[in-house]
Amino acid sequence: MILYNKDGGSDGGEAVVVLKKGPWTAAEDETLAAYVREYGEGNWNAVRKKTWLARCGKSCRLRWANHLRPNLRKGSFSPHEERLIIQLHSQLGNKWARMAAQLPGRTDNEIKNYWNTRLKRFQRQGLPLYPPDILPYNHVPQQQTYLRQPKTPSSTLLSPTPASSFAFRTPTPPPLCPKRSYNTAFNCNPSYTSSPTAFLVSSPAFHSPPSSYHSTYPVYSTKQELPSNQIPYSASLGVYQVSKFSGNANYDHNHHTALHISTCQLLEDVMEEAEALADSCRGPKRRQLMAAPEEDNFFSGTFRHCASSDKLCSLQGNDQTAQKEEESLQMNTMHDEDIAQLLDWGSESGENSNGQFSVITTEDNLVLDNHQLASLFPADDDNNNNTNMNPSWDNLSGIC
DNA sequence: AAGATGTCCAACCGCATTAAG
DNA sequence: TCTTAATGCGGTTGGACATCT
């Protein structure tokens, strides 16, 4: 361990010094920024070797990522961003980095802080974290037999602190994959930043205040870790898969339609963010407000489909291996369907035909990057943003 | 006015993963 | 193949400030 004795900028040059902690000074910021300008990002441990900074590499990286890097968006989250965070959290759980990838200019730390604050406030007020039409992260239908199983290894993920963890009434299935294993198929590809939108849920009910909101929606009060198991993961292949988009057609047409609409609405949301990336390429406005029945949200549809299959959802006994396998199948099913609907939407909306909407498929993987989204979505309709968003939910007192 | 409480935010810590030697 | 450093991520903490009582 290298030790420094620094206090914010003086260059002592001591052999034994203590790594500085605590708030960064302007001088440190400038030094770090200059370092990055000269050497680029990465190799953070070299900062203290090439500069007078007495900060560890991790600290430098964090400071750069959260405060100094260009294109950071400071200030409060917009209502639209807040909506997106809620939606993303309902899908991804506490995957802040992945959520941040959907919010240009925002950091995982910001999102995490926002969510934790919101979590505390809602818990204190006894309010649900999600609008009624968005099922909480990890929601599973009660007919799934593993709900009655004794604790699984996932119980080890129980968080000791209430502030940043949240549990729902339904037990949490065990994690399906090792941490970051999705890198192989998603995260390493920059295009991944948009792919989660393929399985996001959006419903018009989310944009309007539910009259029975307080009385009908479950209030969550227990705490539990939120493992990331929303990315379809193939246990056998070790990658997340998107396969055979047309192969999962055995969900009913109503769901198909509703899910299609929901996905469309959500893509609108994300694309609004992507607009920030679109400096040119202005073309015909593409924006449609669609409505979907409240009961036809993505999860209910997906799990109804899932629950209809004994093979997928009827877990017998406590065989964890079998359980993981089953859950993996569920995830693949979810993702396949959603991706299929995404593609279906792209096709039906006609965007495919103009060549701007490109979905890259590489064997089992599907990617659709922000730039593609941006180009798909001309940035000339800012005035319409508000019309798409009924602010009622956002304006609910004490909610957002 | 003062203390209590809540909110926001920056930063650190520990762990997991990856890459390099 | 193993070890180690670097990196990334999520959890947690604590200080500053705002608001409430």
Image (cartoon, coloured by chain):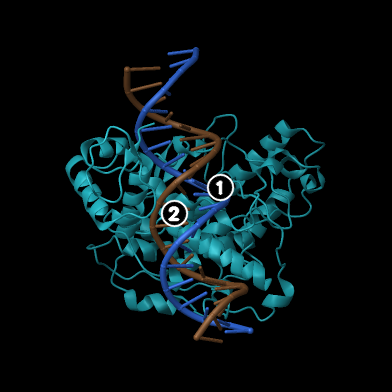
Chain colours: A cyan, B brown, C blue
Labelled disc at residue A358: none
Circles 1 and 2: CB atoms closer than 8 Å: no
Kindly identify the amino acid type of the residue bearing the numbered disc 2: Asp
Q: Is residue A211 visible?
A: yes
Q: Quadrant of residue A42?
A: top left
Residues A241 and A257: in front is: A241
The residue that mark 2 highlights is A108
Q: How many marks?
A: 2
Q: Is residue A52 left or right of residue A98?
A: left
Q: Residue at x 78, y 48 (%)?
A: A147
| A187 vs A77, nearest the viewer | A77
Q: In the rendering, at what x and y percent does residue A235 appear?
A: 60, 32
Chain ID of residue with mark 1:
A
**Residue shown at the point (37%, 45%) measured from the top left:** A59
Q: Is residue A357 visible?
A: no
Q: Earlier in the sequence, mark 1 or mark 2?
A: 2
Most extreme residue toward the left, as rendered?
A38
Q: Is residue A296 above or below residue A10?
A: below
Q: Position of residue A108 (x, y in %)?
A: 44, 54
C-alpha distance separating marks 1 and 2? 24 Å
Q: Nearer the viewer, mark 1 or mark 2?
A: 2
Q: Secondary structure under badge 1?
A: helix
Q: Secondary structure at mark 2?
A: helix
* Camera-nearest residue between A72 and A209: A72
Q: Where is the N terminus of chain A found, in terms of image quarters?
A: top left
Q: Nearer the viewer, residue A354 or A19?
A: A19
Q: Is residue A173 left or right of residue A80?
A: right
* Placement of A188 over or under A215, stated as above or below: above
Residue A44 vertical position relative to residue A122 in the rendered view, above or below: above
Residue under label 1? A335
Q: Is A167 displayed left or right of A84 in the figure?
A: right
